[in-house]
Amino acid sequence: MSDTLNPCVSCGACCGTFRVSFYWSEAEDGGGVVPVDLTEPLNLFMRNMRGTNDRAPRCVALQGEIGSCVSCGIYEQRPTPCREFDMSGENGIYNEACDRARAKYGLPPLFSPVKPSLIESYVNLSASTLQEHVQSPGL
């Protein structure tokens, strides 16, 4: 295990930005593990974590201060959307939603992808600059 602290424990921005909706059967009363008292119906087939469908979303299970020190009060019982939400940069994969949520709270992005078009521009610029400065023998 790494000595580096997982950035999620000092963030929590996703829990204060997005609605967490999931299929109703993930809740305890549907045979799942998500505590039913922390959910509310969204429609006939879907539920969401209480607080996440509000104008200023904040999951009821989030403990602590966003951007400082946070934890999930039901981490082992969290619904699928939470389990599937990766922090940006995890396994080298950019997650725009993670960095967007962080920006909402004034937190820096965790991962900035290098866009191929920028690399191509740099290579092309370098090649043309190099040709300008290289003289052919005999000139």
Image (cartoon, rainbow, N blue to C red):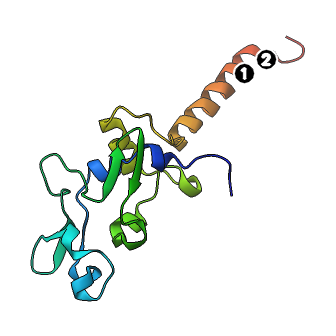
Q: Position of residue 116 (x, y in %)?
A: 54, 43
Within 10 Å of disc 1 (Cα), the crowding (few <14, some 14-19, many 20+) is: few
Element assignment for label 2:
loop
- Residue 85 badge: none
Question: In the image, is residue 55 above or below residue 21?
Answer: above
Q: Which quarter of the figure has residue 85?
A: bottom left
Name the kind of residue labelled 1 in the image: Leu
Q: Position of residue 92 (x, y in %)?
A: 58, 53
Residue 69 left/right relative to 22: right
Say which quadrant the C terminus sits in: top right
Q: Which quarter of the figure has residue 126?
A: top right
Name the kind of residue labelled 2 in the image: Val
Element assignment for label 1:
helix
Q: CA distance from mark 1 to mark 2?
A: 6 Å
Question: In the image, is residue 35 above or below residue 87?
Answer: below
Q: Position of residue 120 (x, y in %)?
A: 58, 38
Q: Which quarter of the figure has residue 114?
A: top right
Q: Residue furthest bottom?
A: 31
Say which quadrant the N terminus sits in: bottom right
Q: Position of residue 105 (x, y in %)?
A: 32, 36
- Residue linked to disc 2: 134
- Residue linked to disc 1: 130
Q: Residue furthest right?
A: 138
Within 10 Å of disc 2 (Cα), the crowding (few <14, some 14-19, many 20+) is: few
* Contact between labelled residues 2 and 1, with CB atoms less than 8 Å apart: yes
Residue at the image point whose x is 41% and y is 65% from the top: 75
Residue 34 left/right relative to 10: left
Residue 52 left/right relative to 64: left
Residue at the image point whose x is 39% and y is 38% from the top: 67
Is 101 or 114 nearer to us in this picture?
Answer: 101
